[in-house]
Amino acid sequence: MTGRPRTVSDDEVFRAVADTVTEVGPAGLTLAAVARRAGLTAPALTQRFGSKRGLLVAFATREAGSVTTVFDAARDRGAAPLEALRDGLVAFTAPITTREGMANNLAFLQLDLTDDELHTYSATQSRALRAQLAELLEEAAAAGDVRAADPAALVDIVYAVYAGAQLTWAIDGTGELGTWLARHIDKVLAPHRPGRP
């Protein structure tokens, strides 16, 4: 006998986790809160993931493994490598629309940094993100769209700008985070683009 099909997929549950984190931070991240947002019950989540801890580990695993998918989506829209790089980075921050949401995500990052198991997944995600940046910059260089004497150093710079621009937006930025981030990514790449000032 097979079980009843799930009416709410794991991906939908993980989106509910991300949205709950952005809205209320890790302090408000309960099985009941995630279940309400996903259209399930807390016991249903417990049956599926075992515990809140199990849900967080499953969420972290999925996040660490989804980096390529985000950039592939930008490529699938026909974006050139540098556009796919920028659009992919912006896509990672799309759920964050307020400073409070940024603060809540930073609080969740603190949890990732202080929990050994969750930190493993955060590090995996970070390395995967850097690998995608390197791949896209190599594609851009092959197409003649970017020149860099030290491509690895440029990856580090872009990654640092990606992280730093989020903080500067939260502190004293203007407009939407995505627009702010895209502008800073374009700005750091501009000196490396042939024919650009």
Image: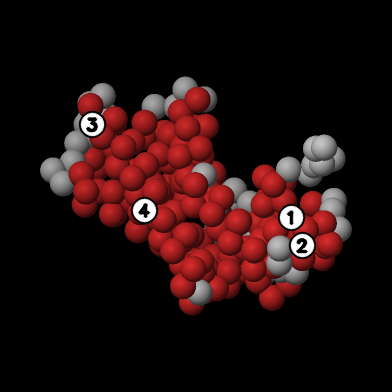
C-alpha span from label 1 to label 3: 45 Å
Q: Nearer the viewer, residue 64 or 166?
A: 64
Q: Which residue is mark 2?
A: 46
Residue 5 falls left or right of residue 55:
right
> What crowding class fits label 3: few (fewer than 14 Cα within 10 Å), some (14-19), or many (20 or more)?
some
Q: Is residue 139 above or below residue 113?
A: above
- Label 1 vs label 3, nearer the camera: 1
Residue 37 falls left or right of residue 189:
right
x and y percentages locating residue 6 in the rendered image:
80, 42
Task: Verify CB contact (< 8 Å) between mark 2 and mark 1.
Answer: yes
Query: Which amino acid, by three-letter code, is at mark 1?
Result: Arg
Query: Which amino acid, by three-letter code, is at mark 3?
Result: Ala
Query: Which amino acid, by three-letter code, is at mark 4?
Result: Arg
Q: Is residue 16 above or below residue 79?
A: below
x and y percentages locating residue 179 in the rendered image:
52, 47
Image point (82%, 37%), residue name = 1
Q: Which residue is mark 3?
A: 141
State the mark number for residue 127.
4
C-alpha span from label 3 to label 4: 21 Å
Residue 194 can be seen in this image: yes
Q: Which residue is mark 1?
A: 48
C-alpha span from label 2 to label 3: 48 Å
Q: Secondary structure at mark 4?
A: helix
- Label 4 vs label 1, nearer the camera: 1
Q: Quadrant of the C terminus?
A: top left
